[in-house]
Amino acid sequence: MSKKVLIIDDEPGVVKMVRYLLEKSSLAVVSANEGEEGIKLAAQEKPYLILMDIMMPVIDGNEATRRLKENETTRQIPIIMLSALGQEGDVAKSLELGAMDYIVKPFPPQELLERVKKILG
């Protein structure tokens, strides 16, 4: 059985590219296009890893990360932030809220894959 990764991002192009990359590496992928839906999906699907955008409608990725880390069911799921926000303060805030890693968009596909594989083991 392949490990499942949840992508939470409101940009269809990013979701499509990341999904292709992960599925090509034999990973199962589920996705949500906003934070609220992503939180529900994380609790239902219990993925091995979450890839989360920060700037999204309804609730942003930092708030979604905070809620996921407060929830007993989803607390242990590692989160990698994928964001166009590359300032040191943005990165620090996400890591403080519980994200395990932070990748600034646009990113080389191979870099994302290496970081995902590192976490999934």
Image (cartoon, rainbow, N blue to C red):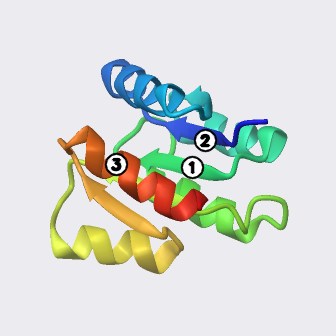
Q: Which residue is mark 1?
A: 50
Badge 3 or badge 1: first in the primary sequence: 1
Within 10 Å of disc 1 (Cα), the crowding (few <14, some 14-19, many 20+) is many
7 left or right of 95?
right
Residues 74 and 66: in front is 74
Q: Secondary structure at mark 1?
A: strand
Q: Position of residue 80 (x, y in %)?
A: 45, 57
Query: Between tags 2 and 1, which lies in front?
Result: 2
Name which residue lies at 29% across and 56% down.
103
Q: CA distance from mark 3 to mark 1?
A: 12 Å
Mark 3 residue type: Leu
Residues 119 and 7: in front is 119
Q: Position of residue 13 (x, y in %)?
A: 31, 20
Q: Position of residue 113 (x, y in %)?
A: 39, 46
Q: Which residue is mark 2?
A: 5
Determine if residue 97 is in view: yes
Badge 3 or badge 2: first in the primary sequence: 2
Name which residue lies at 72% across and 68% down.
76
- Position of residue 33 relative to residue 41, above or below, is above
Q: Position of residue 67 (x, y in %)?
A: 65, 61
Contact? badges 2 and 1 (CB < 8 Å): yes
- Position of residue 114 relative to residue 3, above or below, is below
